[in-house]
Amino acid sequence: MDRRLNPLIAVAVIFCAVTRCGTLPNGRTWGQDAIYPVDLGGIPHAAYDALVNMQTWLPLAGAVTVAPFDRKVSVPPERLLRKALPA
């Protein structure tokens, strides 16, 4: 084994050992309640938060703004293929 690889392996092992011991501020470990028990009561709240969040609507607004100009700017793939492939 190459001697330059040994420090890299040591750093990777230490990093994995240190980062796996994290806890959240409430004392629970990360992902402890990710699957079970599922709180179905939080779904309407999450849907409302997504509905009123600006980060949900900005990509849609950008897509609607750019859509009319997209056909003028982009080249249809058929035209590119006709130019690239000889008949």
Image (cartoon, rainbow, N blue to C red):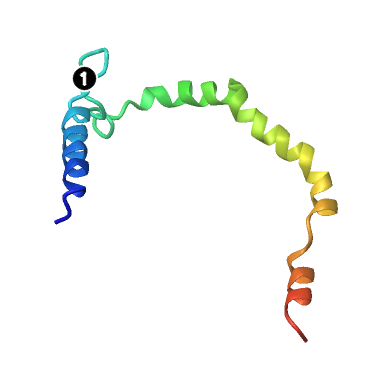
For the point 78% across and 37% down, which residue is it? Answer: 65
Residue 86 picture location, percent across and down: 76, 84
Q: Residues within 10 Å of mark 1 (few under 14, many from 20)?
A: few
Q: Identify which amino acid the numbered label 1 is placed on.
A: Arg
Residue 35 picture location, percent across and down: 27, 34
Extreme residue in the bottom direction: 87
- Specify the quadrant that holds the C terminus: bottom right
Residue 3 picture location, percent across and down: 16, 50
> Which residue is at the front of the view, 79 or 3?
3
For the point 20% across and 48% down, which residue is it? Answer: 5
> Which residue is at the front of the view, 43 or 16?
16
Q: Please name the residue that numbered disc 1 is placed on.
A: 28
Please tell me in which quadrant of the rendered image residue 38 appears.
top left
- Specify the quadrant that holds the N terminus: bottom left
- Left or right of 11 on screen, residue 81: right
With respect to residue 26, does 7 lie above or below?
below
With respect to residue 29, does 82 lie above or below?
below
Residue 24 picture location, percent across and down: 26, 18
